[in-house]
Amino acid sequence: VPAAALATAAGAAPAIAAVSVAAAGHGSGAISPRARNLAAKEAVDASALAGSGPEGRVIERDVRAALEGRPALTAGARAALAVGGAVPSTGTGLGGRANMADIEAGVPVSPTAAGSVGSAATTAAAAVSAPADFPGAYADVPVKGIRKLIADRMLDSLSTTAQFTLNASASAVRMQELRARFKGSGEELGLSKVTINDLLLFAVSRVLPKFPFMNAHKNGDSLRTFDRVHLGVAVDTPRGLMVPVIRNADLLTLERISSEAKRLAAACQGGSVKPEELSGSTFTVTNLGSLGIESFTPVINTPEVAILGVCGIEPKPVLDGDDPENSGVAFVPHIGFSLTINHQVVDGAPAARFLKAFREAVADIDLWLAK
């Protein structure tokens, strides 16, 4: 079903559902209010059901019997049914739910298991899906190649892990000051091109070894922790998202981390990155800060158990002094972080302790560089 048709149907779904149940109950033409509401919600053609209530009235139990043997539906799937299609026997969405793609490509459940689902809705939706509802040209872009790989990986990550995101911020004052000093330094130091992101990668590489459960993979029913930090760095490319790996980042200097991050990013964007440079990470960092993002929910790069999202730098009001009653307010630049963990193997409190330690390292980045 074209996306435009689904968007149209989503807005008109309640009216379509009402048409599909209006003639419910062949024998008596009667349907209980609860049955009518449930049938409309689940896109069941109640007019095809045999009522078991008084005088052949269709009651809620009859609708629920029709739902047995079919997967639960997402909101998008209900909209898809409103413009035609049949409920598939299984769903590929979260928790086994049937989504829009399942409705388009699914093999319908047997009539005995799910009743006649969506048939009246198909007829009633004819006017909704008429060509007049498609103003202007549109294009169907195939999802293939690296885009298909990304799609499969993202869906697998979200459907096989319990993802949970923590958001916090850290003072960016010293980091910005240090970046300015690096930028004005001579070429002989090799630090003039060090970026804010490079400083963050350095901080992550130093804090992670203190929290081995974060530098890990979920390996079946076990947690595999790693001695070395192999840092995945998300890179936006014309072909799609890529995650090259800085090997042994915990052993590298800031200058080496900076140069390696730039080399890998250029290789990804130019199409020369090697396959072995895109695998083997133990923890990933993704940065949307340059786009003004204040918080987001990064998706874990499985089998890793966590991913750190970097947000923008924004002024944050803080007390200018130690006495809350007699202190003024100063606006101090803070950088935001969004840490997503796999709650199957990492609990919220330990993850929060890692994030706290990382934020402290960022706030005192000059001291960490001196260690």
Image (spheres, rainbow, N blue to C red):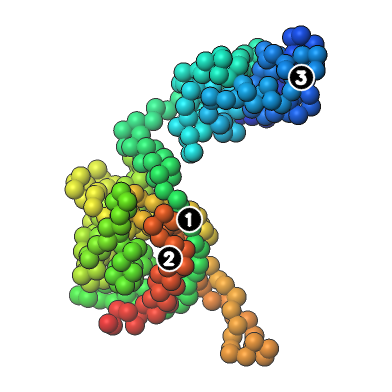
Q: Residues within 10 Å of mark 2 (few under 14, many from 20)?
A: many
Residue 296 left/right relative to 319:
left
> Residue 117: x percent and y percent?
60, 18
| Residue identifier under label 3 | 53
Q: Are marks 2 and 3 in contact (CB under 8 Å)?
A: no
> Residue 3: x percent and y percent?
54, 27
Which of the 4 image quarters holds residue 264? Answer: bottom left
| Foreground residue among 329 and 204 | 204
| Residue identifier under label 1 | 164
Q: Amino acid at mark 3?
A: Gly
In this view, 193 is above or below 270: below
Res 9 seen here: no
Residue at the image position 27 percent from the left and 55 percent from the top: 281
Q: Amino acid at mark 1?
A: Phe
| Foreground residue among 275 and 131 | 275
Residue at the image position 42 percent from the left and 28 percent from the top: 141
Which of the two labelled residues, at mark 2 and mark 3, occupies the earlier sequence position?
3
| Residue identifier under label 2 | 351
Q: Amino acid at mark 2?
A: Ala
Dot 2 lies on which element? helix
In this view, 60 is above or below 329: above
Which of the two labelled residues, at mark 2 and mark 1, occupies the earlier sequence position?
1
Q: What is the C-alpha distance between the residues marked 2 and 1?
A: 10 Å
* Outermost top residue: 27
Q: Are marks 2 and 1 in contact (CB under 8 Å)?
A: yes
Dot 1 lies on which element? strand
